[in-house]
Protein backbone atom coordinates (compact mmCIF):
# COMPACT_ATOMS: atom_id res chain seq x y z
CA UNK A 1 0.00 0.00 0.00
CA UNK A 2 1.15 3.52 -0.84
CA UNK A 3 0.00 6.63 0.99
CA UNK A 4 0.13 10.13 -0.51
CA UNK A 5 -1.20 13.42 0.80
CA UNK A 6 -4.79 12.71 -0.30
CA UNK A 7 -4.82 9.06 -1.32
CA UNK A 8 -4.37 5.47 -0.28
CA UNK A 9 -3.13 3.48 -3.29
CA UNK A 10 -3.42 -0.25 -2.92
CA UNK A 11 -2.77 -3.21 -5.16
CA UNK A 12 -5.78 -5.44 -5.74
CA UNK A 13 -5.55 -9.18 -5.14
CA UNK A 14 -6.81 -11.73 -7.67
CA UNK A 15 -10.16 -12.07 -5.88
CA UNK A 16 -10.51 -8.30 -5.62
CA UNK A 17 -9.85 -7.97 -9.37
CA UNK A 18 -12.66 -10.43 -10.03
CA UNK A 19 -14.96 -8.22 -7.94
CA UNK A 20 -13.59 -5.13 -9.70
CA UNK A 21 -14.60 -6.63 -13.05
CA UNK A 22 -18.14 -7.34 -11.82
CA UNK A 23 -18.72 -3.60 -11.26
CA UNK A 24 -21.46 -4.37 -8.72
CA UNK A 25 -19.97 -2.52 -5.72
CA UNK A 26 -18.83 -5.81 -4.14
CA UNK A 27 -15.23 -4.56 -4.26
CA UNK A 28 -16.21 -1.26 -2.70
CA UNK A 29 -18.05 -3.14 0.04
CA UNK A 30 -14.96 -5.31 0.70
CA UNK A 31 -12.67 -2.27 0.79
CA UNK A 32 -15.17 -0.45 3.04
CA UNK A 33 -15.41 2.53 0.69
CA UNK A 34 -18.41 4.40 -0.69
CA UNK A 35 -19.58 3.49 -4.21
CA UNK A 36 -18.50 5.77 -7.07
CA UNK A 37 -19.16 6.09 -10.78
CA UNK A 38 -16.65 3.37 -11.65
CA UNK A 39 -17.23 1.66 -14.98
CA UNK A 40 -15.05 -0.69 -17.02
CA UNK A 41 -14.23 -0.10 -20.66
CA UNK A 42 -14.38 -3.03 -23.05
CA UNK A 43 -10.59 -2.73 -23.46
CA UNK A 44 -9.98 -3.03 -19.72
CA UNK A 45 -12.44 -5.93 -19.42
CA UNK A 46 -10.60 -7.75 -22.22
CA UNK A 47 -7.22 -7.02 -20.60
CA UNK A 48 -8.50 -8.34 -17.26
CA UNK A 49 -9.80 -11.56 -18.83
CA UNK A 50 -6.96 -12.27 -21.25
CA UNK A 51 -3.84 -10.81 -19.61
CA UNK A 52 -4.15 -9.51 -16.06
CA UNK A 53 -6.06 -12.32 -14.31
CA UNK A 54 -4.14 -15.16 -16.04
CA UNK A 55 -0.83 -13.53 -15.03
CA UNK A 56 -2.11 -12.89 -11.51
CA UNK A 57 -2.90 -16.59 -11.13
CA UNK A 58 0.67 -17.61 -12.09
CA UNK A 59 2.55 -18.05 -8.79
CA UNK A 60 5.92 -17.35 -10.45
CA UNK A 61 4.81 -13.81 -11.36
CA UNK A 62 5.11 -10.88 -8.99
CA UNK A 63 1.45 -9.87 -8.86
CA UNK A 64 2.31 -6.26 -7.98
CA UNK A 65 3.47 -5.80 -11.58
CA UNK A 66 0.29 -7.32 -13.05
CA UNK A 67 -2.56 -6.02 -10.92
CA UNK A 68 -4.49 -2.78 -10.84
CA UNK A 69 -3.59 -0.37 -8.08
CA UNK A 70 -6.72 1.45 -6.95
CA UNK A 71 -6.63 4.90 -5.39
CA UNK A 72 -8.96 5.79 -2.55
CA UNK A 73 -9.57 9.40 -1.56
CA UNK A 74 -8.96 9.83 2.16
CA UNK A 75 -11.41 12.74 2.35
CA UNK A 76 -14.28 11.06 0.47
CA UNK A 77 -13.50 7.39 1.20
CA UNK A 78 -14.17 6.62 -2.50
CA UNK A 79 -12.16 4.95 -5.21
CA UNK A 80 -11.15 7.74 -7.60
CA UNK A 81 -9.03 5.94 -10.21
CA UNK A 82 -6.71 3.08 -11.04
CA UNK A 83 -3.25 2.48 -12.38
CA UNK A 84 -1.94 -0.71 -13.92
CA UNK A 85 1.59 -1.87 -14.59
CA UNK A 86 1.70 -4.04 -17.70
CA UNK A 87 4.01 -6.77 -16.46
CA UNK A 88 7.32 -7.25 -14.75
CA UNK A 89 10.42 -5.37 -15.90
CA UNK A 90 11.80 -6.48 -19.27
CA UNK A 91 15.48 -7.21 -19.87
CA UNK A 92 16.21 -3.47 -20.10
CA UNK A 93 14.44 -2.88 -16.78
CA UNK A 94 11.44 -1.16 -18.36
CA UNK A 95 7.83 -1.33 -17.22
CA UNK A 96 4.79 0.29 -18.81
CA UNK A 97 1.95 1.96 -16.95
CA UNK A 98 -1.61 2.87 -17.88
CA UNK A 99 -4.13 4.75 -15.77
CA UNK A 100 -7.55 6.31 -15.55
CA UNK A 101 -9.51 8.59 -13.26
CA UNK A 102 -13.22 7.92 -12.80
CA UNK A 103 -15.37 10.56 -14.49
CA UNK A 104 -16.66 12.31 -11.38
CA UNK A 105 -13.10 12.80 -10.04
CA UNK A 106 -11.36 14.11 -13.17
CA UNK A 107 -9.69 17.49 -13.05
CA UNK A 108 -8.70 17.30 -9.38
CA UNK A 109 -5.06 16.24 -9.77
CA UNK A 110 -5.67 12.75 -8.43
CA UNK A 111 -3.96 10.97 -11.31
CA UNK A 112 -0.86 13.14 -11.04
CA UNK A 113 -0.72 12.11 -7.37
CA UNK A 114 -1.36 8.42 -8.16
CA UNK A 115 1.40 8.31 -10.79
CA UNK A 116 3.74 10.10 -8.38
CA UNK A 117 2.95 7.57 -5.66
CA UNK A 118 3.61 4.64 -7.98
CA UNK A 119 6.90 6.23 -9.09
CA UNK A 120 7.96 6.33 -5.44
CA UNK A 121 7.17 2.62 -5.07
CA UNK A 122 8.83 1.69 -8.38
CA UNK A 123 12.04 3.48 -7.39
CA UNK A 124 12.37 0.91 -4.57
CA UNK A 125 12.22 -1.98 -7.08
CA UNK A 126 15.86 -2.55 -8.10
CA UNK A 127 15.03 -4.32 -11.38
CA UNK A 128 13.17 -1.28 -12.75
CA UNK A 129 15.24 1.33 -14.61
CA UNK A 130 12.60 3.10 -16.71
CA UNK A 131 8.83 3.62 -16.69
CA UNK A 132 7.11 3.99 -20.05
CA UNK A 133 3.62 5.17 -20.96
CA UNK A 134 1.62 6.05 -24.05
CA UNK A 135 -1.11 8.66 -24.33
CA UNK A 136 -3.58 9.54 -27.04
CA UNK A 137 -2.54 12.81 -28.65
CA UNK A 138 -6.03 14.15 -28.03
CA UNK A 139 -5.90 13.39 -24.28
CA UNK A 140 -4.22 16.53 -22.99
CA UNK A 141 -5.03 15.71 -19.35
CA UNK A 142 -3.26 12.35 -19.62
CA UNK A 143 -0.02 13.69 -20.97
CA UNK A 144 -0.09 16.60 -18.49
CA UNK A 145 -0.06 13.94 -15.73
CA UNK A 146 3.14 12.51 -17.20
CA UNK A 147 4.75 15.92 -17.75
CA UNK A 148 4.04 16.87 -14.12
CA UNK A 149 5.79 13.64 -13.06
CA UNK A 150 8.88 14.42 -15.18
CA UNK A 151 8.26 11.97 -18.02
CA UNK A 152 9.92 12.90 -21.31
CA UNK A 153 8.20 12.50 -24.68
CA UNK A 154 10.39 10.05 -26.63
CA UNK A 155 8.33 9.36 -29.73
CA UNK A 156 4.95 9.36 -31.38
CA UNK A 157 2.71 7.54 -33.80
CA UNK A 158 -0.19 8.95 -35.79
CA UNK A 159 -2.44 9.04 -32.71
CA UNK A 160 -0.19 8.55 -29.66
CA UNK A 161 2.74 10.07 -27.78
CA UNK A 162 5.24 7.76 -26.08
CA UNK A 163 6.86 8.73 -22.80
CA UNK A 164 9.76 7.58 -20.59
CA UNK A 165 10.85 8.30 -17.06
CA UNK A 166 14.42 7.21 -16.36
CA UNK A 167 14.93 6.23 -12.73
CA UNK A 168 18.13 6.81 -10.83
CA UNK A 169 18.51 3.94 -8.41
Image (spheres, rainbow, N blue to C red):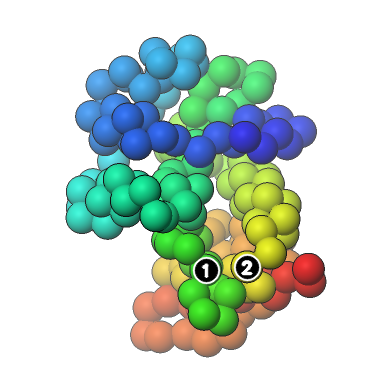
Q: Residue at x 50, y 48 (%)?
A: 64
Q: Position of residue 93 (x, y in %)?
A: 58, 75
- Left or right of residue 99, residue 56 in this image: left
Tell me how many marks there are. Answer: 2
Image quarter of the N terminus? top right
Q: What residue does disc 2 label? A: 127
Q: Residue at x 39, y 55 (%)?
A: 60
Q: Could one spot residue 100 in this view of the protein?
A: no
Task: Identify whether 10 is placed above or below 141.
Answer: above
Where residue 145 sits, quadrant-wise, is: bottom right
Q: Position of residue 46 (x, y in %)?
A: 20, 52
Q: What residue does disc 1 label? A: 89
Are circles 2 and 1 on residues that touch, CB within 8 Å? yes
Image quarter of the C terminus? bottom right
Q: Position of residue 131 (x, y in %)?
A: 59, 68
Q: Residue at x 40, y 85 (%)?
A: 157
Could you tell me which secondary element the residue under label 2 belongs to? Answer: loop
Where residue 146 sits, quadrant-wise, is: bottom right
Task: Identify whether 116 is placed above or below 96.
Answer: above
Nearer the observer, 122 or 146: 122
Marks 2 and 1, how far apart in space? 7 Å
Q: Position of residue 45 (x, y in %)?
A: 23, 47
Q: Earlier in the sequence, mark 2 or mark 1?
A: 1
Amino acid sequence: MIETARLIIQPLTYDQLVKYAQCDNSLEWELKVHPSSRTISSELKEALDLVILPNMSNPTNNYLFWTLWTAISKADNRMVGDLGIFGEPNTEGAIEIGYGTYDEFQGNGYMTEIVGGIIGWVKKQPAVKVITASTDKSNTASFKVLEKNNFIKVGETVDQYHWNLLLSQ
